[in-house]
Structures are given as structure tokens and as C-alpha cells.
Amino acid sequence: MKDDFYTMGGGHFWEDVFFYQKWRIQRNYVTKKCRLLDNWDIRRHEGSFEECRRAFVKYIEAYEIARQKGHMIVMIHSIGQSKNIFKPLWRKALQNDFMAAAVNYPSTQKDLAAHTKQFHFFLDHLEDVDTVSFVTFGAGSAILQNLFADKAPWQKRLKQARVVEVMPYTYGSELWDTLGDNRLTGFVVGPMSKDMAPNRIRELPQIKLDLGIILSNKSWLESLAEVLTGSRMPRRYAEDIKQYSGAKDIVAIKDHHWNIFKNPEICEAVIRFLKDGKF
């Protein structure tokens, strides 16, 4: 198949398994075939992971791609989203001398255990980085908790600094569990919805790193889901969440954007905690 082909970035059927200076190797969740995308989402090679990795080395030399080093922020989106929700935060991170990798994963196609394996693979192949921090949105917090439930090579190789969870499912979500029981919505939101059930979330370990949590009003997706299911998510109070999660700091910021990360106050709070350990 011809290379140098523009793609849409693989938001829902491809999983990022390698990242370096905005170049990515993605793996199709069905065929397992990999492809190398440049920083413009143009496909530069296709084949196995090893073949794409070797092709990338050639592009490093041809394009004189700068070596990355230092502190990387890994960003994990929620169900039904893609890495693109993090664009405003990604820009803010670069302005503050962080590296940033917003990671695509097929959130509506696989369960929590499968997504966790992808992120272990991604972090095991994160090169020329000495420190990682994490930012999650919504159900992404469950993936991160599950990552730290396992022992993996990257945990010994990389220093883990801080975590910011934006609107996390700290107690799980009865709403997403309800959606998974409905045949139509279950098909749309996928198997991970069942992993958001409160009894399953309670089984996940607390994150031992410095943790900051940002709360806000309900997202448009949650509001729509409540209307469709006739149910409501219970209200949680900041102090209860802080005690339950072991968070170092917690803040509530009102937001009315379609994408919460388009709120400059949210992005500034995330970066502030990653730098200073407080909001």
C-alpha cells in the first residue's frame, strides 16, 4: 500500500503504541497492523511495529528530527473521545517546557484490561524520557489506576512525578453502567462502560503519586446520557472525594465549554499542579 497518505489520525479504531516528537506508531485494534504517522498525521509507513520503528529511524536522519528529553506529560481521554480534546492543554504544556503526548485509544471498542495493556506497551516504548506525569479526563482515571495495579518495566525506568485527574470517576459511575446494559447505547459506548461500575472501580488501587483533582459541572455527554436513561449521577462533595482518593489538592472550576480543555482556567490549573504540586 502506498505511503505518504493523509489520515484522520485514528481517533477510534487505532491505538497509539509509540510517540516521539509528535510522530506516532499506531496499531489497528482489529488487524493489529501498524502504521507510522508524522506530525501532520500523514502515513509514512505501514507494517509490523518493528518495521514502522525502523522506518522512523530513517526519517529521524532524513528530517533531522530533534531528540526529545526530559519530562513528558501523558494525557488519557475518556470514553467516546480522542486525543484531540487535549489540544489546548498540549499547547500550554509545551509553552511551559514540558513534552506532551496525548494518546489515542479505541475507547468504545475494548475493555479496561485491554486499554491498560496498550498503555503499558506505550510507556515501555517511550524513549529519551526520564520523567512522566499524567493527566486524565473522565474514565481515563480508571485506566491510570489500573496501570499502577501492575508492575511493568517502565515503572522502574521512568520517574513518576504527578497526576491531575479532571472530572474523574472516583467512585465509578452508575450512569455508564446503566448505559452498558442498554443494547443500543451499550453498542455505542462499548465494553468499558461496564468497567465503570462502582463495585469495579472500588477494586482499583489508589494512586500513590501527588494527585490533584479538578471538578466541574456535568459534561454535555453526561447530561445527555441522563436524559436518555432517566437516571442521575449522584452528587459528590470535594472534601469527600479528596479523602476517598487520597488527593493532595482538589479544586472546583465551573465550565460551559463543549470541550472542557478550551477553558484557559482549567489548563492553567493543570500546569500549575504539575509544576508546583498545588492548584
Image: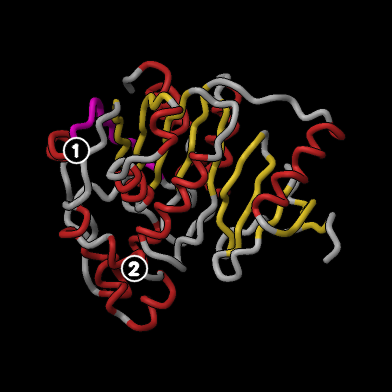
Looking at the image, tell me whether mark 1 or mark 2 is earlier in sequence order: 2
Q: Which residues are magenta?
A: 245-255
Q: If the image is split into quadrants, where does the C terminus sit?
A: top left
Determine whether 35 is above or below 66 in the image: below
Q: Is residue 166 above or below residue 159?
A: below
- For the point 59% across and 26% down, the residue is 128
Does 132 lie within the magenta span?
no
Residue found at the far bottom of this picture: 183
Q: Is residue 130 left or right of residue 42?
A: left
* The N terminus: image quadrant: bottom right
Check disc 1 and report its element: helix, strand or loop.
helix
Residue 186 in percent (x, y) is at 36, 76
Q: How is the image coloured?
A: secondary structure
Task: Return the mark for residue 163.
Answer: none
| Tag 1–tag 2 contact (CB < 8 Å) | no
Residue sitting at 39 percent across and 29 percent down?
A: 156
Quadrant of residue 126 within the rendered picture: top right
- Asked which quadrant contains residue 165, the reply is top left
Q: Is residue 14 left or right of residue 195?
A: right
Rate crowding at label 2 as few (under 14), some (14 to 19) or many (20 or more) other CA atoms within 10 Å. some
Write down the residue under mark 1: 245
Can you give x and y, in whole percent of width and height, for residue 194 in the image? 28, 67
Q: Amino acid at mark 2?
A: Ala
Q: Is residue 252 magenta?
A: yes
On the image, numbered disc 2 is attached to which residue? 225
Q: Residue at x 69, y 45 (%)?
A: 53
The residue mark sitting in front, 1 or 2, is 1
